[in-house]
Amino acid sequence: MKFTVVALLSAALLLGCGGDPPTADLDTAKNALQDARAAGAEKFASSELSSAQRAFDAAQSELNTENEKTFKNFDKTKSLIADAKSEADKAKSAATSAKAAAKSAADAKIADAVVAVQAVRTSLDGAPAGKGNEGDLEQLRADLGAADADLSAARSSVGSENFAAAEASAASATQKAAAVQEGVAAASQKYAEMVEKMRPWYERM
């Protein structure tokens, strides 16, 4: 009889303890949260990361509360931990997608800028030069060099995952290239007018 009472009390205590605390599961959720941050969630999926952090904090708080009880039940804790892990995975996925989209947009802007700069360089190299426009062409070469510097800055920004800055630098390079193209046209017109002015009067009749 005494043995039976002891056995029943032991069984009741085991049931009251609710099994081992799910600390390993909480660690898994924590690692998922760290993976989300490593994927760039703080920058590219801040809302999703905040939700995941709140879910993790709630799970951790619930685990601590339950651990303080004599009779423990970790069912709610396990559910909250599962939610935290799920939210962290969503944050990582959202960050990965957003970062890829931002990089793609920046790469496209840079590609457009490269085409524009190369086209202007060809025009500038082929522009006629004379005493009347040589200074203008020299200034245009310096302006095109500034466009090249913007392209370098854009590529560097992509490398550091600052895609907004990359797009801004690429756009600046494109604008500078357009301005140089207008300058090349004006310099060519100036050269043509100079040549026409220097023609003998009888050739202009």
Image (cartoon, helix red, strand yellow):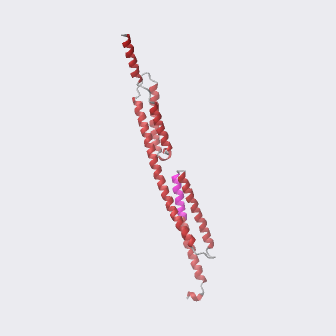
Q: Nearer the viewer, residue 164 or 12?
A: 12
- Taking the spot 59% from the left edge, 63% from the top edge, the residue there is 145
Q: Quadrant of residue 186?
A: bottom right
Compared to 40, does 66 lie above or below? above
Which is nearer the eye, 110 or 177? 110
Residue 3 at x, y = what percent?
38, 12
**Which residue is pictured at 59% across the width and 87% down the height?**
201
How many numbered markers are drawn? 0
Give the quarter of the figure containing the C terminus. bottom right
- Residue 68 in picture, x, y percent from top left: 46, 24
Q: Residue furthest front?
A: 3
* Residue 163 among magenta residues: yes
- The magenta segment is 162-176
Q: Nearer the viewer, residue 78 or 135?
A: 78
Please tell me whether residue 78 is drawn above or below residue 93 in the rendered image: above
Percent across and percent down for residue 102 are 47, 52
Majority secondary structure in the magenta region: helix
Tell me if residue 19 comes above or below residue 35 in the rendering.
Answer: above
Residue 115 percent location from the top left of the image: 51, 64
- Whether 177 is among the magenta residues is no
Which quadrant, please, contains the N terminus?
Answer: top left
Q: Identify the residue at image location x=42%, y=39%.
A: 86
As drawn, the residue found furthest toward the top would be 1
Q: Residue 18's image quarter?
A: top left
